[in-house]
Image (tube, rainbow, N blue to C red):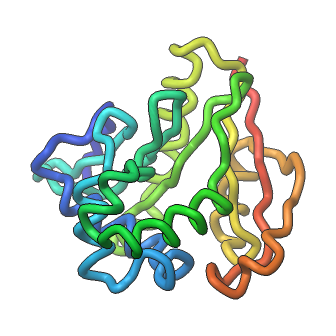
Amino acid sequence: MTVRILRGLPREHREAAAALYWQAFGGKLGLVMGPEDRAMLFLSRAIRGDHAIIALSDAGELLGFAGFKTADGAFAGGTPDDLRAVYGLAGSLWRAGLLRLLGRSVENQRFLIDGICVQREARGLGIGSQLVEAICDEAQARGYGEVRLDVIDSNWRARALYERLGFRALHQESIGPLRLVFGFQSTTAMVRQIS
């Protein structure tokens, strides 16, 4: 299979990207962003196509993507208006509070990855590695010397991939009582030097 890596997420792939994002991260976001139909509405609305690098098959199917975060926003961060439009005023207020507690701020010294997802049937084909390399290229083009991501304690497969690709653990951080909401106990910040 031929895989094309492209910068940006075209509008025709938004719904597929939202579904893939939910497939990858719905397990930890379900209690806050659910039910699934609402989460899909929110993601379809909130996804920033200019904050993604995508992998397409030769037939044009979305196989995966890597989102990133900048001072201008995050791939799947959304705005308070996006939350209100999907969850209403009351629903948006408590969700925003919990997501803010979980979120990581943009830092100036490292380029931040905001999620990497690959379709289940396309895993094991090196697409995740290609997306990471493309993110590193993007970071270098923007003048960064390092790329950072956060991996949850229960996602040992992703952590093993990142270590194989040259990332090293920087520090681990407990999420405390939020573990009852998000279903994991800690995140590990991992960094890869690119220059």
Q: Position of residue 66 (x, y in %)?
A: 44, 47
Name which residue lies at 69% across and 40% down.
Answer: 148
Image side of residue 39 versus residue 10, left or right: right
Q: Nearer the viewer, residue 14 or 179?
A: 179
Q: Quadrant of the C terminus?
A: top right
Where 150 sits versus 132, above or below?
Answer: below
The picture quadrant where one finds residue 167 is top right
Name which residue lies at 47% across and 82% down.
Answer: 30
The picture quadrant where one finds residue 51 is top left
The residue sitting at the right extreme is 171
Where 134 sits versus 124, above or below?
Answer: above
Q: Position of residue 124 (x, y in %)?
A: 47, 65
Q: Position of residue 77 (x, y in %)?
A: 44, 51
The picture quadrant where one finds residue 54 is top left
Where 141 sits versus 147, above or below?
Answer: above
Image side of residue 136 versus residue 54, left or right: right
